[in-house]
Image: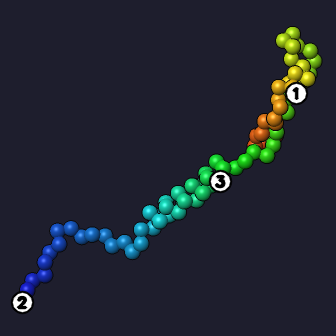
Amino acid sequence: MTLPLIRSRKKPRFRLPWLAMTLGLGTAVFGVHGIGSMTATPGEQVQIIVRGEHPWNISQKTVDAVMSEPIMTMKPLQII
């Protein structure tokens, strides 16, 4: 007759690592969202409006002459 061996420490039995799977899924979702926001292209323009006269020779004509290309942003922006 043989005696059963005594284990020094009982290991918990987990069927599936739910916490690790949930955190991995959350990381994947946030990663896809981050990649989408980093690769998004802006669709709005910045408008610079000059009102009145200024002593530094700033007028609407000089601003329009300097801005050869529109400045693109995510949200519409108006600088007065």
Residue at disc 1, secondary structure:
helix
State the residue at coordinates (54%, 59%): 28
Pointer 1 residue: 64
Which quadrant, please, contains the N terminus?
Answer: bottom left
Rendered image coloring scheme: rainbow
Percent coordinates x, y for residue 2 in the rendering: 8, 86
The answer to which quarter of the image holds residue 60 is top right
| Nearer the camera: disc 3 or disc 1 | 1
Is there a contact, CB below 8 Å, between mark 3 and mark 1?
Answer: no
Image disc number at residue 9:
none
Pointer 2 residue: 1
Judging depth in this view, the residue of 9 and 15 nearest the camera is 15
| Nearer the camera: disc 1 or disc 2 | 1
Pointer 3 residue: 36
State the residue at coordinates (49%, 60%): 23
Question: Which mark is first along the chain, 1 or 3?
Answer: 3
Q: How crowded is the residue under tag 2: few (<14 C-alpha within 10 Å), some, or many (20+)?
A: few
Q: CA distance from mark 1 to mark 2?
A: 99 Å
Residue at disc 3, secondary structure:
helix
Q: CA distance from mark 3 to mark 2?
A: 67 Å
Q: What type is the residue that disc 2 sits on? A: Met
